[in-house]
Image: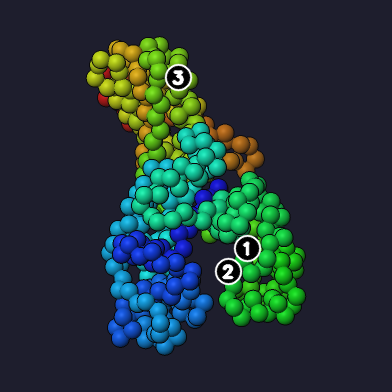
């Protein structure tokens, strides 16, 4: 899965200096955010100049004052910082619902955002274009340009952001598997691994200077020498970062639309646009291993009331052809009565995509699932009350009519009331 990583370093301090209209250079001026030296609190953030003198986040304010008595100490406005970052996350959610960001300013990860961008090319353009649009969308909410990187894993995207700050041409890891990412990481300095200082000291003792040199070591030897933490670092160096994106909010629906100019009157052009939108949304579902259980199609009409069709799906699915087939059947039954100016497709109730169980000796080929999709299509065209199933009641009944009953077979599949 492709991930876009954004990082606003020292975001609480940046927000506070903007709020106070301070013009100090944070690289040369020592500023400590969190309160006055005599307050019982701890350091929430500090400028790079103060950090070079030993000040750290979470340090008692009195200790920070002992290290840098000439520093400017500022009280923190935590609710303001949180509100600003949450507002930015809400704006970023317009690009993709797969967004992760820490909103507690006391956490180290505050100011860092991961966005799942798999399958967004047809909506927002290629990755460089998407990055420019994302950065521009929050430029008025968060001060300064973020460090940005794109990768196939969390670690790869974070490293790309650091490397890309010096060399913008390397701000993205090439698409591919773990071998591709490992090859991209190999020549980079080993200090980019998120290891404790003592482990980096041991790396130097062993003469390990690049990520590739560390990745080339046998995994068992690394675990024996550096412990479990070393084994996890070794996995990162080999492109094996298994940490998943944790969306800020559960992904409950995806939406895409297209404006039609000139307005469209016939179904065939609508089918083409519908297939395109379904493909865009299904790519995002596939990237999450999810499927949609309901589709909503909205048509804005020229000089007429909008047409809205809600279609229940037989099973959670992320297959554009199946979605197109059912929704087009709905349009054939009840075609729009005026030219269509905009088409919007929304997929709701996203859940794990339905799997396909294979037999031990012969593939089952998802016969039941195919039957349910066929029944849905028939129910849409002819009415759910026209499709019946036989249920055995009493095989020994004297009257043949009493031996079975005919019951509705597709009431829950048509996605619309029976005619």
Observer-side mark, 1 or 2, equals: 2
Q: Is residue 45 above or below residue 329?
A: below
* Residue at image point 53% right, 50% down: 3
- In the image, residue 34 lies at what x, y percent? 34, 75
* Residue at image point 51% right, 56% down: 147
Along the line of sight, which residue is nearer the eye, 386 or 83? 83
Q: Secondary structure at mark 3?
A: helix
Q: Mark 3 sits on what residue? A: 271
Contact? badges 1 and 2 (CB < 8 Å): yes
Quadrant assignment for the C terminus = top left
- Alpha-carbon neighbours of circle 2 within 10 Å: few (<14), some, or many (≥20)? few
Q: Secondary structure at mark 1?
A: helix
* Residue at image point 40% right, 49% down: 139
Figure quadrant of residue 83: bottom left
Display colour scheme: rainbow
Disc 2 to disc 3, C-alpha distance = 50 Å
Looking at the rendered structure, which numbered label has been put on residue 236?
A: 1
First in residue order: circle 1 vs circle 3: 1
- In the image, residue 10 lies at what x, y percent? 43, 66
Observer-side mark, 2 or 3, equals: 2
Q: Mark 2 sits on what residue? A: 194
- Alpha-carbon neighbours of circle 1 within 10 Å: few (<14), some, or many (≥20)? many
First in residue order: circle 1 vs circle 2: 2
């Amino acid at each position: 899965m492709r991930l876009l990583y954004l990082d606003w370093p020292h975001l609480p301090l940046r927000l506070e200096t903007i709020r106070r209209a301070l013009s100090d250079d944070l690289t040369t001026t020592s500023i400590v955010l969190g309160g006055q030296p005599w307050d019982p609190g701890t350091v929430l953030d500090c400028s790079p100049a103060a950090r070079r003198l030993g000040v750290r986040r979470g340090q008692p304010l009195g200790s920070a004052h002992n290290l840098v008595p000439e520093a400017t100490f500022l009280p923190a406005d935590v609710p303001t910082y949180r509100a600003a970052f949450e507002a930015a996350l809400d704006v970023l959610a317009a690009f993709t619902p797969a967004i992760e960001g820490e909103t507690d300013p006391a956490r180290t990860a505050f100011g860092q955002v991961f966005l799942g961008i798999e399958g967004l090319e047809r909506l927002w353009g290629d990755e460089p274009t998407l990055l420019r649009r994302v950065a521009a969308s929050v430029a008025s909410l968060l001060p300064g340009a973020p460090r940005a990187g794109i990768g196939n894993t969390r670690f790869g995207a974070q490293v790309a952001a650091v490397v890309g700050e010096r060399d913008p041409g390397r701000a993205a890891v090439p698409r591919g598997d773990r071998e591709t990412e490992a090859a991209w990481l190999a020549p980079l300095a080993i200090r980019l691994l998120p290891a404790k200082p003592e482990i980096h000291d041991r790396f130097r003792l062993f003469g390990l200077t690049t990520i590739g040199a560390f990745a080339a070591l046998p995994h068992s030897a690394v675990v024996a020498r550096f412990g479990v933490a070393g084994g996890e670092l070794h996995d990162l160096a080999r492109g094996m970062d298994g940490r998943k994106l944790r969306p800020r909010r559960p992904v409950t629906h995806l939406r895409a639309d297209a404006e039609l100019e000139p307005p469209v009157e016939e179904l065939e052009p609508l089918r083409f646009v519908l297939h395109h939108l379904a493909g865009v949304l299904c790519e995002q579902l596939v990237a999450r291993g999810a499927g949609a259980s309901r589709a909503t199609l909205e048509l804005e009409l020229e000089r007429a009331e909008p047409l809205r069709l809600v279609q229940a799906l037989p099973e959670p699915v992320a297959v554009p052809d199946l979605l197109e087939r059912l929704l087009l059947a709905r349009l054939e039954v009840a075609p729009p009565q005026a030219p269509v100016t905009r088409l919007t497709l929304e997929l709701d109730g996203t859940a794990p995509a339905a799997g396909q169980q294979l037999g031990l000796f012969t593939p089952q080929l998802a016969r039941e699932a195919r039957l349910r999709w066929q029944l849905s299509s028939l129910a849409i065209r002819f009415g759910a009350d026209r499709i019946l199933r036989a249920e055995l009641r009493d095989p020994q009944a004297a009257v043949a009519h009493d031996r079975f009953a005919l019951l509705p077979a597709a009431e829950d599949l048509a996605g619309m009331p029976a005619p």
